[in-house]
Amino acid sequence: MVPQFPPLIAQLRQLAQGYRGFHTPGHQRGRGAPASLRAWWGEAVFTADLAEIPGLDNLGQPEGILRSAQARVAEIFGAEHTWFLVNGATAGVLASLLAVHRENGCVILPRHVHQSVIHGLILTGAKPIFILPEWDAQQQVWGGIDPEKLTAILASKNHSSINALVLNSPTYKGVCGAVAECIEIAHKYNIPVIVDEAHGAHFPFHPQLPDSALTLGADVVIHSTHKVLTSLTQSALLHQQGNRISPQRISQCLRLVQSSSPSYLLLASLVAMAEQMAEQAETLFDQLLTQLTWFIPAINYIPGFSTLKINADQIGFTAQDPTRLVIQTQELGVTGFMLDELLHEQYKITAEFPDYGDLTFILSPSHTEADLQIFVQALQEISTNRPAQPLTALPPLPAVTEAVMSPREAFFAPQRMLPWREAVGKTCATMVSPYPPGIPILLPGEWIAPEVVDYLQEIDRLGGQVVGVEIDQTIAVVSNW
Ligand SMILES: Cc1ncc(COP(=O)(O)O)c(C=O)c1O
């Protein structure tokens, strides 16, 4: 059966042949493409890789086929306006922080935001007001922020200086915070709410999935559709609704952070993905959720393994994405890093995100019953062959230190590199995030306490990764000379 082609894709197909091009891209519809890639990818990828030629549109200021395609995708996702992103959800986060920025303003945000949010603070100069998210010590997992802490901050601060509230829900491990309550609290003060729902792009499409922040009334929602839906890597969506953030301002700010030569391969993949959701989402997610009714109990039955199950009565833990599988490994006496390596090397099963005490996987409707059975068999074998041995516990996270400068001031200040130990007492000039636990332990402008360096060394010893420091264990500090 010939599939229905959405207008953008039909247009690309029509323009892909029959024209003699004298324009970018230089491979000229594949004729000049390297033979190695042509042999592997075939011709079609190159013929569809067109620039903004007549019949196509300008993503920076769409007036034709991209404008109507964005409107159609907004309708499918339930937003008032939607923009196509070709530099990942990262571009959406940066553009939305730029769009709400007013000079000398602040942004309220949880500490476990993605680095793109911190980069947005560096670009804008907004001062962060951090709220430490809730921590479930038993399950060793972060939730969202406590709405009461947000209320307390708003009651005590001059809220006219607050540019926005940023929320990060769901987390990488699929935990959703109290998004509805936080939006309601911020909106009482007319503060716009930006929700980084990068990992929840599928939420609008099935009643058994957690509510999307779009239905909960967020002003801007960012979806990394390439992570959990079917568009190509680096494609994502920014949605807006209401009147707190102007769509024109978002368009202006997106022009600051996106390429002026967006890939039509990425754009076509966004359009096709959205139509796929419009037509099939309910059936596809029904199939996946049905599979999970045997798959999750089967994993929990294997000695040594259990899957993350949040307690939804706990503050900051409102819902959980059933398609995000977090396998806890500590009972078996292996770290998530060890299990990750074992599965990849010996069973050719590749996970999404290893942590000290667990391993996270993304489950999608494209996984077949056979995939899931092979997965369970691999875990069974690993469980049988590996005797349990207690693991050293992770050290407790040291308290966040005081900010001496704003992230922007520190990032643009003169810097020098120092070994970790010698950096104690200095001002950090970069962002340092140990994985685990994936919370930035230092931001540009924060004072480097001795406990922070102890913590980094312990995480390194336990096999974790410290992102933001150099491999020779040096760190960028603000230089006073
Ligand atoms: C919570 C969160 N937000 C934003 C991003 C950025 O997404 P992208 O890789 O699509 O730029 C990520 C990426 O991992 C993320 O985990």
Image (tube, rainbow, N blue to C red):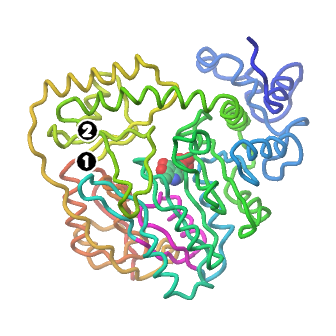
**Residue 1's quadrant in the figure?**
top right
Instruction: Quote the CA–CA distance across marks 1 and 2.
Output: 15 Å
- What type is the residue that disc 2 sits on? Ser
User: Is residue 342 or residue 215 the one in the foreground?
Assistant: 215
Marks 1,2: beta carbons within 8 A? no
Spot occupied by residue 131 in the image (x, y as percentages of width and height):
42, 72
Q: Image height check: is 428 above or below 266? A: below
Picture disc at residue 356: 1
Vertical placement of 201 versus 80: above or below? above
Quadrant housing residue 332: top left
Residue 12 drawn at (x, y percent): 81, 28
Q: Is residue 35 left or right of residue 365?
A: right
- Which stretch appears magenta? 106-131
Tell me which residue sits at (66%, 63%) in the image: 219
On the rendered structure, is 257 left or right of 6?
left
Identify the residue at the far top of this view: 1
Foreground residue among 261 and 274? 274
Residue labelled with disc 2: 306
Answer whether residue 156 is visible to the viewer in this image: yes
